[in-house]
Image (cartoon, grey):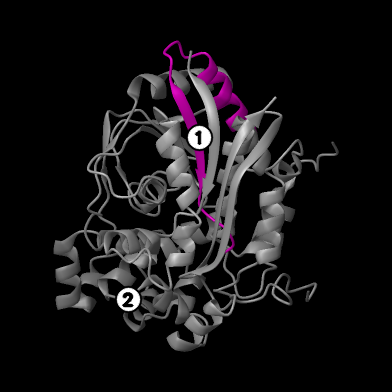
Amino acid sequence: MARLTAGVGSSHVPLLGVAVDQGKTRDDYFGPIFAGYDWTRDWEAREKPDVIILVYNDHASAFDMTIVPTFAIGCAERYKPADEGWGPRAVPDVIGHADLAWHIAQSLILDDFDMTIINQMDVDHGLTVPLSMMFGTPDAWPVKVVPLAVNVVTYPVPSGNRCWALGEAIARAVDSFPEDLNVQIWGTGGMSHQLQGPRAGLLNREWDNAFLDQLIGETDAARWIPHIEYLRETGSEGIEMVMWLIMRGALGRKTRLLHRHYHIPCSNTAIGHIVLEPAA
Amino acid sequence: MNPIPPTRDIHAYLAELEDIPGTRVYTAARARRGYHINQFAMSLMKADNRDRFRADEAAYLNEWPISDEAKAALRARDYNRLLDLGGNVYFLSKLFSTDGLSFAEAVSTMTGMTFPEYRDMMLAGGRSPIGNRSIKGGY
């Protein structure tokens, strides 16, 4: 049977992709950010997951305002890196796991989550930057990916509680997939940042770290954080952190911390990263 | 556990979103108002469209059903005004890239700071949430 073995949280700032693509990951600006991922790159190389369920948001790349799905799951065989206005990133195509994705999609719908199914899309920095952070610059990604796109742009976005519950349902779906697979779930985006208006540039180290604390152990306090708190405390784009709750919800009642990293700033954004495993 | 009940009152929910200083949350009302601004911005993902826009901004904008006010704001790159008119920064970022601006530099134009000032603020830990959380509450 498929096993959900770990969860990873990570920011997905596009500038990190630029740093990787231009070979600047060890300079004075980016070095402290990437150093916090060294542990994880070694760990991933040892863990050798088969599939990543990668929770992210599209940034006006695959989706425009024509259609706004709250939760959408990629069931395609492969995905091309998106052209976000300056040409696609020179990273490998992302290979899907269509069997697992369709199994999860069907299971979630029967479990009362009305998923949108995607058979064709390009994937932007929200998805490819975390792959670069965790796997570096291979010729082919060493994992298959099930993209799970969340609307965190047009309000109302899904509640933290709904995201957590979706994670729980994803865990049930993975558990019932008959093939023996090592599956991880990643929640990406955040942490505090605001990209718009006179308040742009807001960062909140204290709140971000309290949020990381709440992903560890038995507490489920984070699932009850209302949207207005993210907006007030972490900037208008800090709301992306609800996607981390899908990851946390999937890990079950209790988690154990394996690794944690926090750095300010990267461009407009606070970088957060955490690695968790389910604890009995 | 003592869960906070989910928000059921859509009016109270939406009113709260307007209580954040210097911020326009991308609500349905803004999404409706700015629909064509944002779709215009998305059209700049195609190189051909970027070239046509650069060659004659006014002519290109006239192909879109957007107000004269919005056209003027787009030509002036007045991003705060565009947010008021329903623009969203992820869509507007296609105009940033068309102009060859980094995201951070474009964002800095909304803050009343120069880009070097904004960059220094970020390097020093960013803008503090203190005093920036609530218009009504002033905290």
* Subunit that carries the residue with mark 2: B
Q: CA distance from mark 1 to mark 2?
A: 34 Å
Instruction: Identify residue type, mark 2.
Output: Leu
Can residue A60 be seen? yes
What percent of the width, then of the height, locates residue B51?
15, 70
As drawn, is A200 to the left or to the right of A72? right
Query: Horizontal and vertical percent for residue A170?
Result: 54, 26
Residue B70: which quarter of the image? bottom left
Foreground of the two, A36 or B81: A36
Residue B24 lies, with reference to residue B118, above or below; the image says above
Q: Residue furthest top?
A: A178
SS at badge 2: loop
Give, as a three-letter code, the residue at label 1: Ile
- Please provide percent x and percent y for residue A180: 43, 15
Q: Please check whether the numbered discs 1 and 2 fall on a single chain.
A: no
Q: Secondary structure at mark 1?
A: strand
Instruction: Name the residue located 40 percent from the left edge and 29 percent from the top edge.
Output: A51
Instruction: Look at mark 1 in the image and give the residue it sits on.
Output: A185
Say left or right for A77 vs A44: left
Marked residue chain, label 1? A
Is A174 one of the magenta-colored residues?
A: yes
Range drawn in magenta? A165-194
Q: Is residue A224 above or below residue B111?
A: above
Q: Nearer the viewer, residue A260 or B54?
A: A260
The image shows residue A264 at horizontal and vertical percentages of 55, 68
In the displayed structure, A6 sits above or below A139; it is above
- Which quadrant would the C terminus of chain A be assigned to in this image? top right
Look at mark 2 in the image and give the residue it sits on: B101
